[in-house]
């Protein structure tokens, strides 16, 4: 049990009055009309309040009441703030410590809320001010303009134009009204005629003449013309009398008949009259500039050029003369003054004044020299300039250029190099004028004077090359060492530029030495040096500097001796811009450096064979066999060499040996093709059957088997071959196409459709199979089904240019072809088939230049696509020149195209096996579908 008392047993709080808090100080019962209990009296309440106020340290109620009375009626507000001055319900309550604590808490809460409210209001006000500052109202934006209206005078206000309706409709109607012309009444013409008549000269009878129809109802055009002629005559007479000639007879005139038109051209403004106001405004602005800052020469120059532009050359000269007086130390002002007076006799005087004010100005001395026309006077002026400015390199150069005698020029340069030893150009000019022996001495002195100049070292190397001693002394190597020591080594790009300059001047040995000694400067082994050097070489080739490119390749191949890419690039350079011997030499070095590279061996053999060196090509292939035994590429190259040179038996023997020593599917395929081309179909079929036993997954062998049966007319066996082939090699798209086309040629379109459906399941993303399906439906007359298939195809393969070309040319209306092609170009990036299709569109619209441009873009994108060459050649046959056709054929032969839709089918026909690329091109151009 606890010792705490229950609630009813506890003593009552101090000053507790039961029922006082709820106002129940007394009650009346039905039987007792008097109060059951009297509450505290007023005196008791006052006494309790006074006691409580004394305990809390508050002023007594009486003093507070007096104070309120003195302040004049503020008792109500203070009453509610004083806890001891309660009325009504809490009149009898006591203010204890709990009440005080609650009041303090609520006071703290109120202060906190007030502070938060004040901060929120300040933040909102700042945001509001920021928003109003960034987004001012219209009336605020025009506040300064409204304020400026106070300075507008009454006249300016009255001259303001009225606001008009400037909408497009009303503006066009007003322009139409302005352009509408009305017939002028006869009265207006008569009045105009009478207003220009002169009474003393118009009438021949001495009096003023009047028209018969003075009321203006009748028009006498003869009289109007006569009046106009007489007025013009009177004005010409007046002009003749005002001339400088014989005024008595009236024959003289102030107009020069010969230069009349010329003077009119000079008087005409170069611009329209609307710029006159602009010139006036700029003139006022520049006048303000020169008045505000008269010592600014640029303002005077601008003002003078403005007057020159306005055609007032006199005002321009006057303005710039004032500028020279204000700014006597300004070279630009004096030069502008000389330029404006260049055609007058004052130019030399102005130049003299300018030099007197600026005797250290090189530009003014040079301009004064150019004003002279006699060589001796030019020399005199330039020598006076050198007396004032002996350290000016530009003046010495001008003086040397004026000398016609080389000996005098050498003397001038010798003196110049003594005075200006750091001028590289002067040293080099002196070395060029000296003999080779003296030039060496001059360059030695120049190297000592300018140890950081690489131009002097290059000049010394070129001098050694000129003397034939370039191989004995490597001047560039010594120069690089000195420049590195002096920390004045130029960048690698600058050295390449210097090498190209030497090549342009014919110093090829110096060019090679520069590349050899400086190409690796600034490149570490971690850098991609091979790509960097190849890019440098390509840049030199593009600029036509082939010796520099050759030297870059030579240096790169010394570092990357086993790089096939570099050897091929060097060989391409020699093939395109070198000689046959140089190409063979590069390829011989290539096969020695890369003996296991069959590509380089075959390239060398091909070059030998194309040059007519058949025995040399055989020897190269023999060497290649020794280095690469049983290599199928070399075997097949040897077979091709013998076959194309008419040695069919030798080629057949080589193929037999190759099938034994290098039994690959490619060797067997070439053997079958060889026998088929030479007409031995049975042997070709037998080889095909043997090869399929060894290589059942070789798609080309299955295709050859089917094609041989087709040539023999055995459609059933061909169908069986293709059917078996697609089961063995289900991913071969050409095999599926041959199978479907066989069924279509046999008249079984349904079977062909089924074959293509199976093919698309096996190879779902093949644009060729989708395109063939669309073409099958189109050839069968099912255009709606073709369009449906095309929609599905573009969803499966959205980046195929082949599908877009098929859709544009065969499934779209003529009016929709160009919009569809534009959509295709946006979706498909860099597709040569699509580019050819766009070129054909322009061709059909007779926009030949655009068509040719698109054909060339397609060729630049992929030069190995034979169909593009065929289309371009067909286009040129109709709209090109003979030279252009020959150029295209030569480029096609050089690129040797290999694939396309029509090209392989034509090139691989047995009848076309021995034909050249040019002949194949013409055949494809004839066969290709327009």
Image (tube, rainbow, N blue to C red):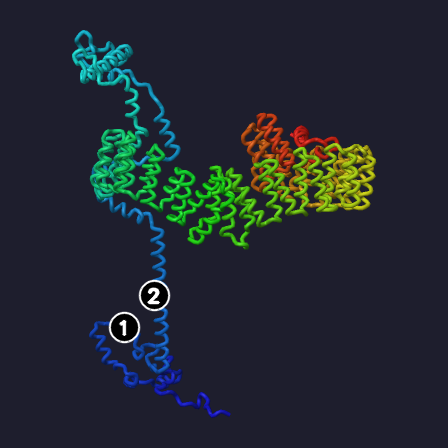
Dot 1 lies on which element? helix
Residue 900's quadrant in the figure? top right
Q: Which mark is residue 118?
A: 2
Element under disc 2 = helix
Task: Say if residue 277 shows up in the picture.
Answer: no
Horizontal side of residue 205 vs 587, given as left or right: left
Q: Residue at x 61, y 44 (%)?
A: 567
Q: Are marks 1 and 2 in contact (CB under 8 Å)?
A: no
Front label number (1 vs 2): 2
How far across and down, in percent of the image, does residue 107 sit? 34, 74
* Residue sitting nearer the eye, 586 or 688: 586
Viewer can see residue 786: yes
Q: Kindly identify the residue that appears in the image at 59 percent across and 25 percent down.
A: 882
Q: Residues within 10 Å of mark 1 (few under 14, many from 20)?
A: few
Between the C-alphas of marks 1 and 2, the distance is 28 Å
Q: Few, some or many C-alpha atoms within 10 Å of disc 2 (few <14, some 14-19, many ≥20)?
A: few
Q: Does 117 sit left or right of 576 as displayed?
A: left
Q: Quadrant of residue 48?
A: bottom left
The image shows a total of numbered marks equal to 2
Residue 472 image offset from top left, x and y in percent: 51, 45
Above or below 326: residue 852 = above
Q: Earlier in the sequence, mark 1 or mark 2?
A: 1
Kindly identify which residue carries mark 1. Answer: 76
The location of residue 347, given as percent across then percent down, is 24, 32
Q: Is residue 45 above or below residue 825?
A: below
Q: Residue furthest front?
A: 437
Specify the quadrant that holds the C terminus. Answer: top right
Q: Name the residue located 58 percent from the left edge and 41 percent from the top edge.
A: 830
* Rendering coords of residue 745 (x, y %): 76, 33
């Amino acid at each position: 049990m606890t010792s705490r008392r229950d609630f009813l047993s506890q003593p009552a709080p101090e000053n507790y009055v039961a029922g006082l808090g709820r106002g129940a100080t007394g009650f009346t019962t039905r039987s007792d009309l008097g109060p059951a209990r009297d509450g505290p009296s007023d005196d008791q309440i006052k006494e309790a309040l006074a006691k409580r106020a004394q305990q809390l340290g508050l002023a007594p109620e009486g003093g507070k009441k007096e104070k309120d009375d003195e302040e004049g009626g503020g008792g109500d507000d203070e009453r509610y703030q004083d806890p001891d001055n309660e009325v009504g319900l809490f009149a009898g309550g006591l203010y204890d410590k709990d009440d005080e604590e609650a009041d303090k808490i609520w006071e703290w809460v109120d202060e906190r809320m007030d502070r938060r409210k004040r901060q929120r209001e300040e933040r909102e006000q700042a945001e509001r001010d920021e928003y109003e500052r960034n987004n001012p109202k219209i009336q605020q934006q025009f506040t300064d303009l409204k304020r400026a209206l106070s300075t507008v005078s009454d006249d300016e206000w009255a001259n303001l134009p009225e606001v008009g309706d400037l909408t497009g409709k009303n503006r066009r109607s007003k322009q139409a009204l302005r352009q509408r012309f009305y017939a002028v009444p006869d009265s207006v013409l008569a009045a105009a005629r009478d207003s220009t008549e002169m009474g003393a000269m118009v009438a021949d009878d001495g009096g003023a003449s009047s028209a018969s129809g003075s009321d203006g109802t009748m028009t006498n055009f003869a009289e109007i013309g006569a009046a106009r002629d007489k007025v013009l005559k009177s004005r010409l007479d007046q002009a003749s009398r005002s001339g400088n000639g014989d005024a008595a007879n009236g024959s003289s005139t102030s107009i020069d008949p010969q230069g009349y038109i010329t003077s009119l051209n000079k008087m005409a403004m170069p611009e329209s009259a609307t710029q006159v106001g602009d010139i006036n405004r700029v003139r006022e602005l520049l006048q303000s500039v020169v008045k505000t800052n008269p010592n600014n020469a640029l303002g005077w120059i601008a003002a003078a050029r403005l007057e020159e532009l306005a055609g007032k050359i006199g005002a321009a000269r006057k303005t710039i003369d004032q500028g020279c007086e204000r700014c006597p130390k300004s070279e630009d002002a004096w030069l502008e003054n000389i330029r404006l007076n260049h055609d007058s006799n004052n130019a030399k005087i102005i130049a003299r004044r300018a030099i007197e004010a600026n005797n250290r100005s090189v530009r003014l001395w040079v301009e004064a020299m150019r004003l002279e026309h006699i060589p001796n006077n030019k020399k005199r002026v330039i020598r006076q300039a050198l007396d004032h400015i002996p350290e000016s390199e530009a003046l010495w150069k001008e003086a040397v250029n004026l000398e016609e005698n080389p000996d005098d020029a050498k003397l001038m340069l010798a003196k110049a190099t003594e005075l200006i030893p750091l001028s590289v150009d002067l040293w080099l000019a002196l070395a060029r004028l000296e003999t080779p022996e003296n030039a060496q001495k001059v360059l030695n002195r120049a190297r000592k004077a300018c140890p950081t100049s690489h131009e002097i070292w290059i000049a010394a190397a070129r001098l050694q090359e000129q003397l034939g001693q370039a191989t004995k002394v490597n001047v560039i190597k010594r120069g690089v060492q000195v420049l590195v020591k002096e920390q004045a080594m130029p960048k690698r790009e600058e050295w390449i530029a210097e090498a190209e300059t030497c090549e342009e001047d014919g110093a090829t040995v110096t060019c090679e030495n520069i590349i050899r000694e400086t190409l690796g400067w600034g490149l570490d082994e971690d850098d991609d040096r091979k790509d960097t050097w190849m890019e440098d070489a390509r840049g030199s080739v593009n600029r036509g500097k082939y010796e520099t490119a050759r030297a870059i390749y030579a240096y790169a191949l010394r570092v990357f001796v086993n790089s096939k890419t570099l050897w091929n690039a060097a060989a391409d350079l020699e093939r395109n811009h070198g000689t046959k011997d140089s190409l063979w030499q590069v390829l011989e070095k290539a096969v020695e450096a890369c003996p296991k590279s069959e590509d380089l061996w075959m390239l060398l053999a091909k070059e030998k064979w194309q040059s007519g060196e058949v025995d040399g090509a055989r020897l190269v292939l023999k060497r290649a066999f020794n280095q690469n035994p049983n290599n199928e590429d070399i075997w097949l190259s040897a077979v091709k060499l013998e076959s194309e040179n008419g040695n069919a038996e030798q080629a057949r023997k080589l193929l037999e040996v190759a099938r034994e020593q290098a039994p690959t599917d490619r060797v067997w395929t070439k053997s079958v093709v060889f026998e088929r081309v030479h007409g031995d179909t049975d042997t070709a079929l037998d080889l095909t059957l043997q090869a399929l036993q060894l290589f059942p997954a070789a798609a080309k062998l299955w295709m050859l088997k089917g094609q041989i049966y087709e040539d023999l007319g055995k459609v059933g066996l061909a169908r069986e071959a293709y059917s078996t082939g697609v089961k063995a090699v289900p991913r071969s798209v050409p095999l599926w196409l041959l199978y479907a086309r066989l069924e279509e040629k046999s008249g079984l379109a349904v079977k062909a459709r089924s074959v293509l459906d199976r093919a698309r399941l096996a190879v779902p993303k093949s644009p060729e199979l989708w395109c063939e399906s669309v073409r099958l439906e189109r050839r069968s007359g099912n255009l709606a089904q073709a369009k449906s298939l095309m929609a599905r195809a573009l969803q499966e393969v959205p980046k195929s240019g082949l599908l877009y070309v098929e859709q544009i040319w065969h499934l779209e209306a003529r009016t929709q072809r160009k919009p569809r092609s534009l959509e295709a170009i946006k979706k498909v990036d860099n597709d040569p088939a699509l580019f050819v299709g766009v070129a054909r569109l322009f061709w059909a619209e007779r926009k030949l230049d655009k068509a040719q441009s698109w054909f060339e873009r397609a060729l630049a994108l992929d030069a190995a696509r034979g169909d593009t060459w065929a289309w371009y050649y067909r286009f040129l046959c109709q709209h090109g020149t003979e030279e252009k056709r020959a150029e295209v054929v030569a480029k096609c032969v050089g690129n040797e195209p290999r694939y396309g839709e029509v090209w392989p089918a034509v090139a691989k026909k047995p009848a076309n096996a021995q034909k050249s690329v040019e002949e194949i091109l013409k055949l494809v151009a004839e066969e290709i579908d327009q």
